[in-house]
Image (tube, helix red, strand yellow):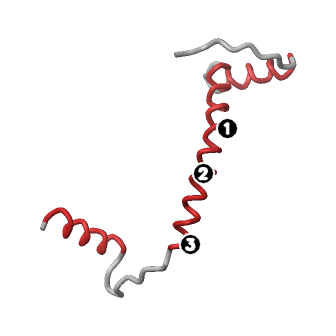
C-alpha cells in the first residue's frame, strides 16, 4: 500500500532529481523509494556481514579429502541423509 509523504527539499535539488528520474524513464517517487530501500537494506547487510565473518572464521576448519570438492562432499552427505 502506497502512502503519501511530504518532504521539504531545496528547489534546485528537486529539479535535478526530476531531470534524473526522467532521463532514467522513472518517476521521482520511484527513484526516492528505491533509494530509501537501499538505505534500509544496508542495515540488513551489516547484520548479514557479521554472520558471514563467523563463516569466514570457520572456513578451512574442516579438511576435505584431496580428491573431492566441497560439492562432492555435500552431495554425498545429502544422499546419505535423504536416500538411505
Front position in the image: 53 or 64? 53
Q: Is residue 56 left or right of residue 43?
A: left
Judged from the image, the secondary structure of the residue bearing numbered disc 2 is: helix
Q: Quadrant of residue 72?
A: bottom left
Q: Is residue 73 left or right of residue 1?
A: left
Q: CA distance from mark 2 to mark 3?
A: 16 Å
First along the sequence among labels 3 and 1: 1
Whether tag 2 and tag 3 are in contact, CB under 8 A, the answer is no
What crowding class fits label 1: few (fewer than 14 Cα within 10 Å), some (14-19), or many (20 or more)?
Answer: few
Please tell me which residue is depicted at 60% across the width and 56% down the height of the picture.
49
The x, y position of residue 56, in whole percent, is 55, 69
Identify residue for label 1.
39
The x, y position of residue 6, in whole percent, is 74, 13
The x, y position of residue 50, in whole percent, is 60, 58
User: On residue 61, which mark appears?
Assistant: none
Please tell me which residue is depicted at 47% across the width and 80% down the height of the picture.
61
Identify residue for label 3.
57
First along the sequence among labels 2 and 3: 2
What crowding class fits label 2: few (fewer than 14 Cα within 10 Å), some (14-19), or many (20 or more)?
Answer: few
User: On residue 47, which mark appears?
Assistant: 2
Judged from the image, the secondary structure of the residue bearing numbered disc 1 is: helix
Relative to 77, residue 18 above or below: above
Q: Nearer the viewer, mark 3 or mark 1?
A: 3
Q: Residue furthest left?
A: 84
Q: Quadrant of residue 13?
A: top right
Relative to 32, residue 83 above or below: below
Q: Residue furthest bottom?
A: 66
Amino acid at each position: 500500500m502506497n502512502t503519501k509523504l511530504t518532504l521539504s527539499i531545496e528547489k534546485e535539488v528537486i529539479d535535478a532529481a526530476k531531470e534524473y528520474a526522467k532521463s532514467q524513464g522513472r518517476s521521482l517517487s520511484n527513484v526516492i523509494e528505491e533509494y530509501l530501500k537501499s538505505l534500509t537494506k544496508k542495515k540488513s547487510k551489516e547484520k548479514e556481514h557479521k554472520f558471514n565473518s563467523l563463516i569466514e572464521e570457520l572456513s578451512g576448519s574442516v579438511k576435505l579429502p584431496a580428491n573431492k570438492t566441497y560439492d562432492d562432499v555435500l552431495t554425498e552427505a545429502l544422499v546419505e541423509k535423504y536416500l538411505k
